[in-house]
Amino acid sequence: MADSHAAPKHPFHLVDPSPWPLLGAFAGLILAAGALMVMRMDSYWVLLIGVLCVLGVMFGWWRDVVREGEYQGHHTKTVQIGLRYGMALFIASEVMFFSAFFWAFFDASLFPKAATGFTWPPKGIETFDALDLPLLNTLILLLSGCTVTWSHHALLHNNRKDFLLGLTCTVVLGIFFSALQAYEYGHAAFGFRDGIYPSTFFMATGFHGFHVMVGTIFLAVCLFRGMNGHFKPDHHFGFEAAAWYWHFVDVVWLFLFVCVYVWGG
């Protein structure tokens, strides 16, 4: 009888059944419902449960993927090609996601209607000074893009000291960005339900802030893995995907800064 546990004779990875896609869908549903409750009723408890569920799914799913790639050897060169295509398509879907928010903002700003007094920004809305905290946050995010590139370059040259140092700087800058954005929100002169400008502003910048937090966690996981000896110059797609995601976050923020803070304000 043939050995059912023999090594596969192909370079592909047939993934074992996993609960994480289904659990992730439910976690995302709870998170979305919680976000709606915050917007409509200022109730945060469902959002908190959703965040904890999403973090739990992230932990379990990433743990399994790390085992598959780092310890079980499933991430062959062929599999990595598929992972790259998957990450590229995921980022493309995120571009479409943010396009909807930009569409809403430009529709309201380029063609002001009676609800806004035919002006933009609407009357009574005190916008943020683009050259204050928004500019500082822009510089922080651009610097973090440089540090993650430095880290990647160091890893490619097997310089683990600079790899970990650059990655640590990126994680710290990501945390700093989120803290400043939270401070900015706390001092906003308008609330989410005060009209079209506040709603489009908070939706666009808020979802970007959420992506920054996810990206920071992504990079922090890579930092933890790097400190434990993971990643090699020729086998580090987990970190490469995190770097791609972080550069996407950088680019989206540049569009937000120019369109929402500078031009739209």
Image: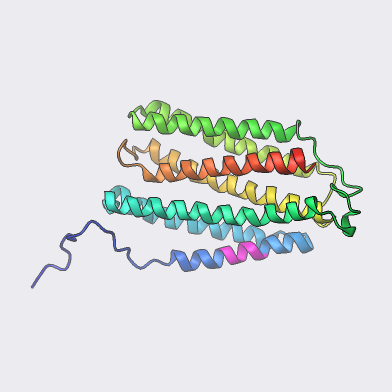
Query: Which sits in the foreground, 94 or 162?
Result: 94
Q: Quadrant of residue 236?
A: top left
- List x then y, in percent, for residue 175: 60, 38
Magenta residue span: 28-33
**Image quarter in which the C terminus is found:** top right
Q: Quadrant of residue 223?
A: top left
Left or right: 1 as drawn, with respect to 81 = left
Q: Residue at x 64, y 30 (%)?
A: 139
- List x then y, in percent, for residue 138: 65, 34
The way the protein has been coloured in the rendering is rainbow
Q: Residue at x 76, y 31 (%)?
A: 132
Q: Residue lying farthest left?
A: 1
**Image quarter in which the N terminus is found:** bottom left
Dominant secondary-structure state across the stretch colored magenta: helix
Q: Indicate yes or no whether the magenta region holds residue 52.
A: no
- List x then y, in percent, for residue 207: 65, 51
Q: Residue at x 52, y 42 (%)?
A: 246
